[in-house]
């Protein structure tokens, strides 16, 4: 068993024993099972999945980092939401606002704003994808 801990700036979202975890790492999805080698990886906005007591659970997460050591996985992220916490219309509106703002941006000069808007889009798409997946 693995101890999964997910922490956002606002609160500790989760602290439970799980059998496996699948993370949206910056370089692609990675799976963590018992006895996994130690590692630290950057996380990209996307879906985090884990198994607990035979049931599958999903969260939409934002950017952050994951550390795997011994039998513990620690996730530090700026967002971690379950399907019930996501308002799809609000997330869709945020994507549309960010995409509109990108149109008026000088991509060669406003690099910080460009990165911010791309992050907003990625996080909200993670929310939308989880919400739509659960609806199907």
Image (spheres, grey):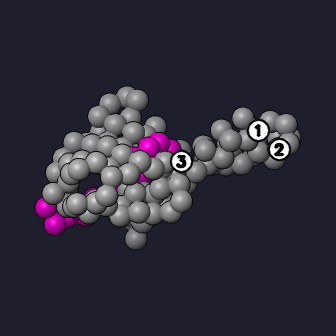
Asked where in the image residue 56 lies, by quadrant, the reply is bottom left
Mark 1 crowd level (few <14, some 14–19, many ≥20, 10 Å Cα): few
In the rendered structure, find residue 121 and report the number of the disc placed on it.
none
* Residue position for label 1: 111
Kindly check if marks 1 and 2 are in contact, taking CB atoms under 8 A apart as contact: yes
Q: Position of residue 15 (x, y in %)?
A: 22, 42
Magenta stretch contains residue 53: yes
Whether tag 3 and tag 2 are in contact, CB under 8 A, the answer is no
- Residue underneath mark 3: 123
Spot the residue most to the bottom. Answer: 136
Residue 18 horizontal/vertical position (percent): 19, 56
| Comparing labels 3 and 1, the label whose residue is closer to the camera | 1
Helix, strand or loop for disc 3: helix
User: Does residue 27 belong to the magenta stretch?
Assistant: no
**Image point (47%, 42%), residue name:** 64
Task: From the top left corner, tell me how far across and down residue 34 is, in percent.
Answer: 21, 61
The magenta-colored residue range is: 51-66
Instruction: State which quadrant residue 57 falls in.
Output: bottom left
Marking on residue 107:
2
For the residues carrying marks 3 and 2, which lies nearer the camera in this image? 2
């Amino acid at each position: 068993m693995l101890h999964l801990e997910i922490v956002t700036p606002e609160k500790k979202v989760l602290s439970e024993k799980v059998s496996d975890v699948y993370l949206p790492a910056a370089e692609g999805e990675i799976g963590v099972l018992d006895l996994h080698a130690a590692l630290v990886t950057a996380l990209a906005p996307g879906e985090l999945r884990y198994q607990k007591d035979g049931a599958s659970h999903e969260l939409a997460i934002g950017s952050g980092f994951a550390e795997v050591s011994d039998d513990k996985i620690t996730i530090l992220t700026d967002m971690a939401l379950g399907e019930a916490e996501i308002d799809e219309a609000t997330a869709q509106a945020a994507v549309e606002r960010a995409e509109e703002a990108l149109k008026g941006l000088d991509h060669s000069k406003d690099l910080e704003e460009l990165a911010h808007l791309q992050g907003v889009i990625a996080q909200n798409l993670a929310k939308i994808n989880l919400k739509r997946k659960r609806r199907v």
